[in-house]
Image (tube, rainbow, N blue to C red):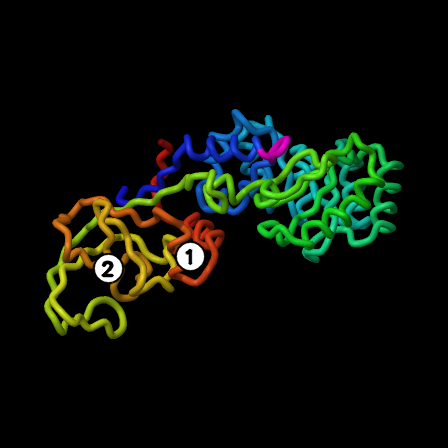
């Protein structure tokens, strides 16, 4: 395989242990194919250390449960589309309204099984979550009279966690109103990663972490993923010749290399003519447009030959800056890359 996704086990474990050192416990977020890293690889490495995993969808939850041999706790953080299968597989469910409770209750009776739920609290992000204490109390009352529903946890999400400002303080003060209404046997958790940089109230049992796990956002963590490809062809081009799609006329003689990795593999087309890759650890500029299945790079100042290694992903932050987007988008886009996965 020409393209290889390298997952660095030591970096991932280092990042996880760093996060745990900053808070009591961690829920590892492995949604979106573990931020593009590969859910199977990441979960397999972390299962030795972590008891809680978070995903975004029903399909992710079922796949992860099978990967972990049904031995770990998995929470679908968001609205679920298949309560039947989630209850059947003991996967934890997020709810944020009393109608959810009614629907889940009916399915529990049908299956003769219990449902394990977490109530989302809206403290200002306005994405999901209960928005008033009165509504929350009504949900709690409904759960108390329903033996088939087990309230495992309540949670909120910090929408401005990377800043130490009043947003965080106000969210936590709002969240505490709901915590005070709750039996202390219920787990309390917050997310995301940047929470561990700030004050964590004593009532919080764990923090949901994704971004830091994968090596970004904090100087104490290390990037977990690297993607390499290889040169498949070298072409000597003269001044005045065109290279790639569109009008990309060379202003002087160049030696170019074709690398079989393009936007279908997750490399943003927005880095055309301004990003670079590493060929034998030498910076080589991407020239012309990023193609669906390949890029063209300038290797004029190297002695590279066909077959040499090319580091396509070595720093998601650089790619994000070139593309005018976020590290999150860059990393998750690499989840669709047609690569062989290698854990080292």
- Is 161 or 183 nearer to us in this picture? 161
Residue placed at 32% from the left, 64% from the top?
272
Is residue 58 something one can see in this rendering? no
Magenta range: 22-26
Mark pair 1, 2: CA separation: 19 Å
Query: Mark 1 or 2, which is nearer the eye?
Result: 1
Q: Earlier in the sequence, mark 1 or mark 2?
A: 2
> Magenta includes 307?
no
- Residue 64 x %, y %: 55, 36
**Magenta segment, principal secondary structure?**
loop
Q: Secondary structure at mark 1?
A: helix
Viewed as shown, does residue 305 lie left or right of 73? left
- Residue 303 x %, y %: 12, 49
Q: Is residue 154 above or below residue 44?
A: below
Viewed as shown, does residue 213 lie left or right of 130? left
State the quadrant of the N terminus: top left
* Label 2 packing within 10 angstroms: few (<14), some (14-19), many (20+): many
Residue 182 lies in what quarter of the image?
top right
Q: Secondary structure at mark 2?
A: strand
Residue placed at 87% from the left, 50% from the top?
134
- Residue 249 x %, y %: 19, 73
Residue placed at 70% from the left, 53% from the top?
128
Viewed as shown, does residue 304 lie left or right of 211? left
| Residue receiving disc 1 | 320
| Residue receiving disc 2 | 296
Viewed as shown, does residue 172 lie left or right of 263? right
- Residue 186 x %, y %: 77, 33
- Is 340 or 308 nearer to us in this picture? 308
Is residue 140 something one can see in this rendering? yes
State the quadrant of the C terminus: top left
């Amino acid at each position: 395989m020409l393209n290889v996704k390298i997952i660095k086990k030591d970096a991932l474990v280092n990042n996880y242990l760093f996060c745990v050192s900053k808070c009591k416990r961690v829920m590892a977020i492995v949604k979106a194919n573990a931020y593009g890293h590969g859910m199977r690889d990441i979960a397999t490495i972390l299962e030795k250390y972590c008891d809680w995993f978070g995903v975004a969808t029903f399909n992710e939850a079922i796949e992860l449960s099978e990967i972990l041999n049904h031995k770990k706790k998995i929470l679908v953080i968001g609205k679920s589309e298949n309560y039947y299968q989630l209850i059947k597989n003991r996967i934890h469910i997020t709810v944020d309204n009393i109608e959810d409770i009614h629907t889940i209750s009916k399915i529990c009776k049908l299956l003769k099984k219990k449902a394990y739920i977490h109530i989302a609290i809206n403290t200002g992000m306005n994405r999901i979550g209960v928005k008033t204490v009165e509504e929350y109390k009504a949900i709690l009352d409904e759960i108390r009279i329903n033996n088939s529903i087990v309230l495992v946890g309540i949670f909120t999400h910090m929408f401005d966690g990377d800043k130490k400002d009043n947003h965080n303080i106000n969210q936590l003060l709002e969240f505490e109103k709901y915590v005070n209404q709750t039996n202390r046997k219920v787990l309390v958790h917050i997310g995301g990663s940047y929470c561990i940089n700030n004050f964590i109230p004593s009532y919080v049992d764990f923090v949901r972490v994704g971004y830091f796990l994968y090596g970004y956002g904090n100087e104490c963590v290390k990037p977990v993923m690297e993607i390499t490809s290889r040169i498949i062809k070298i072409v000597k081009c003269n001044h005045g010749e065109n290279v790639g799609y569109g009008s990309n006329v060379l202003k002087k003689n160049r030696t170019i290399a074709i690398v079989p990795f393009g936007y279908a593999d997750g490399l943003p087309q927005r880095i055309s003519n301004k990003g670079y890759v590493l060929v034998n650890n030498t910076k080589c500029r991407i020239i012309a447009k990023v193609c669906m299945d390949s890029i063209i790079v300038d290797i004029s100042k190297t002695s590279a030959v066909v077959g040499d290694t090319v580091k396509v992903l070595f720093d998601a932050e650089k790619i994000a800056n070139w593309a005018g987007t976020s590290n999150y988008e860059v990393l998750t886009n690499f989840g669709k890359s047609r690569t062989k996965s290698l854990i080292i």
